[in-house]
Structures are given as structure tokens and as C-alpha cells.
Amino acid sequence: MQQLDNVASTLNSLAFGELADARPAGWRFAHPGEPAELANVPLGDGRLTVTAADRLVVTLDGVVLLDAAPGVVITGYRRTAREVVGEASGEVLVRTPAGALVRANGRFRLTDTEGGTPE
């Protein structure tokens, strides 16, 4: 039974790393190619949920932060009260600090003083 628990723990870690991976340069989010979900992961800012279905959707306390097609990978994602930065391999909807959802493709930097613009 212990071996099964270890295998389950390893599979959960792999699933987490495939969907969401906290890295020194910022979060990485990617769709694993099949339906998956990490729900209510406790963070300092709230509870993170990453859902991979027909789209990759990242929420914090139920508010959509990122919404992308399955083939899009988001890297270097960092969010503060004043700024959101990251890079997307394709088109992604990104929640600005001001609360708007804007389209981005490639590197983006969105601030709290404006809707933000992709770089």
C-alpha cells in the first residue's frame, strides 16, 4: 500500500508540474494535452485553480487570471498589485491589475495605471 501511495504522490507532482510550475523567473502554465485540474492550491494571495479542458484557465479565488488555447504555454508569469508580466507562446487573455481582460501574444507587461499593452 505504501508503494501505491508513493506512486500516487509522484503522479500528482508530475501533474502539478505539467499544469503549473512555480519557477524562480515566474510561473509556467501549460495544457498537458488531456483534461486535468489542480484545484484550490493555497497561495499567499488566495487559492489557485488551473483547469485544462477545451482551454487552459488559471483562476485565483474564482477570478480568471489567464485563459488560453491548449497549445499555448505561459512562462515567466508574475503578478503584483501593480503589474502583471509574462510571455505566451500564442494568444492568451490576461487579467490586468486594474481588472480588465486583455489579449496578449508573446511578451506582456500590464500595469495598474492602464489596461496595459503587450510588449
Image (cartoon, helix red, strand yellow):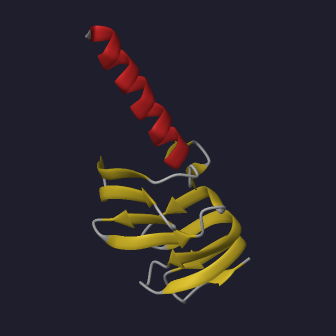
Left or right, residue 40 beside residue 65: left
Identify the image quadrant of residue 45. Answer: bottom left
Quadrant in the rendering for residue 13: top left
Nearest the camera: 81 or 117? 117
Q: Residue shown at 50%/67% (left/top)?
A: 54
Task: State the residue at coordinates (51%, 72%).
Answer: 67
As drawn, 52 above or below 22 = below
Q: Position of residue 52 (x, y in %)?
A: 47, 58
**Above/below status of 43 relative to 100:** above
Q: Quadrant of the N terminus?
A: top left
Q: Residue furthest top?
A: 2
Asked where in the image residue 8 lies, by quadrant, the reply is top left
Q: How many marks?
A: 0
Q: Quadrant of the C terminus?
A: bottom right
Q: Is residue 40 above or below residue 79?
A: above
Please indicate whether residue 109 sits to the left or right of residue 59 in the image: right
Whether residue 111 is visible: yes
